[in-house]
Image: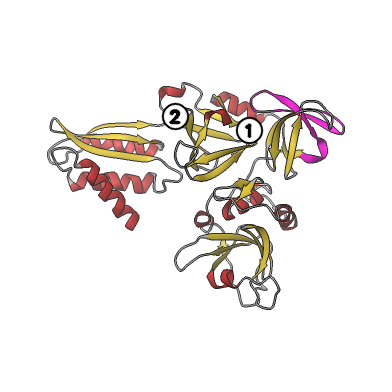
Amino acid sequence: MLKYLNFAIALLLLACTGKQTPPASLLQDIEQIRENFAPDKRTALFEVTVENEADHWILSGETSEPAAYNALGQLSAKAYGGLNPVVEVTLLPGEEFGDSTMALVRVSVANLRREPKHSAELVDQTLMGRPVRLLKSDSYWLLVQTEYGYLGWVTAGSLEPCDQATIDDWKQTAKVSLKSVFAQVKSRPAENAEPVCDAVLGSVFKFDSVKEPWTKVVLPDGRSGYLKSKELQNYKPVSENAGISKKKLVATAKMLLGMPYLWGGNSSKGLDCSGFTQTVFRENGLQLPRDANMQVELGTEVNFSDDFHEVQPGDLLFFGPENRITHVGISLGGAYFIHSSGDVHINSLHPADENFNPYRRKTLRYIKRVIGN
């Protein structure tokens, strides 16, 4: 409730820039719309202020959510303090992008930042060939929304803007993805050829042709190059838990052993804890939400004893202080789990094991099963 109270206080302070204080009922209705349609600022933009101008309540701001925008519009039919509000809220994206309100990532890793500046906090990453939704611009920065709904600012040079028809064509065409941790796309089918760009685990390319041991690929911005065929696999979009192999999932997780921890990292160039779990599950066909306290909402809870014999490979382990989830890892079965903390490594929850982690044992809160038995 504290975050809602803080929002209401902030809204009230902004509103008081006018000569009159907005009616509490109007502020409450706006807050209810936010709670209903844009409750999480990580995945929905909702910035609305209220001022009084010429004896009218003026609602201004912007939102990324059509349902919230429509609900705000309906407030103009209600009277608050005897006045009907004038709604001047913008639904993003605005007209600045024309028909090109989508984009494909054209670099191996696009960094998403909390604000449109390089010094801002890194909140997420998205990979080559992944579509994003464009919301607004600020100089050479673009506010985007990823496939799984996360918001962040990306440099314009990281993206190839396109319309929905281009995105649909990209989705339908034959594609391949990189299954190795790192690679270089070569300008010619030769080891000593100059690179076109680098690629990371999960990078997506349009398939062109094969002449073993090389496969010719096309990048999202139209450039072409060559990768070793053995480093590629046929791309399959993520789906709802479509028969994930626990053995393959564990193998993917172990491929990333030793990769450095990076706050906001979600690629094989660096991973935070939930970026690690999201990357591993994405490569095996299941899209998890971005953050640990989002991922904990999935699956069914696993009751566990001190020896953890009930815990299966692929189960998600959640850690944190009481009533708060701050860390996540992937079970390897029993007491062993793999996670990104400092780097990607394996620990145990059993005191008898050499790599026992007493802090993680003390702060273990939940174990959730998100894939079938």
Badge 1 is on which residue? Answer: 107
Q: Nearer the viewer, residue 193 or 62?
A: 193
Disc 1: CA contacts within 10 A as few (<14), some (14-19) or many (>=20): many
Residue 232 visible in the current orientation:
yes
Q: In the structure shown, which secondary structural element does the residue marked by tag 1 occupy?
A: loop
Q: In the structure shown, which secondary structural element does the residue marked by tag 2 occupy?
A: strand
Residue 2, relative to residue 116: is it above or below? below
Segment colored magenta: 210-232
Q: Nearer the viewer, residue 14 or 32?
A: 14
Q: Position of residue 363 (x, y in %)?
A: 53, 69
Q: How far apart are labels 1 and 2 at the CA level?
A: 19 Å
* Residue sitting farthest toward the front: 119
Number of marks: 2
Q: Position of residue 38 (x, y in %)?
A: 39, 44
Identify the residue at image location x=46%, y=69%: 322
* Quarter the C terminus occupies: bottom right
Q: Is residue 316 left or right of residue 123?
A: right
